[in-house]
């Protein structure tokens, strides 16, 4: 694996393994699931994370967008078996790269715009 799995992020774009994605993405370890869409737009719910739940990670890192418009309810933590951390997407990308290097099963859910 490369030194940086996520190679870069700018508003509306994320570069992973030499490919640029312009839609929100779910990351399951080193796999990318593009076209992530939420039932209520900027309001995250447990139903929006089924691929992550099926993956059974130790940790989920959520990128909340450049202006942090994606709302992550506090109750989400009590409804899943894994730890959840959320950050503005730029920081979430850096944290994801760091956690992916550790001996953890990590997933990500990244909102790329606002």
Image (cartoon, helix red, strand yellow):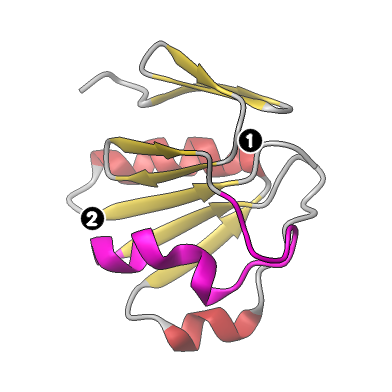
How much space separates mark 2 and mark 1, taking CA atoms? 21 Å
Q: Magenta segment range?
A: 37-58
Above or below 89: residue 43: below
Q: Nearer the viewer, residue 40 or 15?
A: 40
The answer to whether residue 57 is visible is no
**Residue 66 in magenta?**
no
As helix, strand or loop, the secondary structure at mark 1 comes to helix
Q: Quadrant of the N terminus?
A: top left
As helix, strand or loop, the secondary structure at mark 2 comes to loop
The answer to whether residue 75 is visible is yes
Q: Which residue lies under the disc numbered 1? A: 90
Cβ atoms under marks 2 and 1 closer than 8 Å: no
Estimate the x, y position of residue 54 in percent, counting from the top left.
Answer: 27, 66
Q: Quadrant of the C terminus?
A: top right
Q: Nearer the viewer, residue 74 or 48?
A: 48
Q: Residue at x 35, y 26 (%)?
A: 5
Q: Nearer the viewer, residue 3 or 112?
A: 112
Q: In this rendering, would 9 be left or right of 85? A: right
Q: Residue at x 53, y 65 (%)?
A: 48
């Amino acid at each position: 694996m490369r030194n940086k799995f996520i190679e870069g992020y700018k508003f509306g774009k994320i570069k992973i393994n030499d490919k640029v994605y312009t839609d929100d993405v779910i990351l399951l370890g080193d796999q990318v699931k593009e076209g992530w869409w939420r039932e209520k737009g900027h309001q995250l719910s447990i139903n929006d994370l089924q691929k992550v739940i099926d993956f059974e990670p130790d940790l989920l890192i959520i990128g909340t967008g450049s202006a942090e418009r994606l709302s992550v309810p506090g109750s989400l933590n009590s409804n899943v078996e894994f730890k959840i951390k959320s950050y503005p997407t730029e920081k979430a990308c850096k944290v994801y790269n760091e956690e992916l290097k550790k001996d953890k099963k990590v997933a990500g859910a990244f909102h790329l715009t606002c």
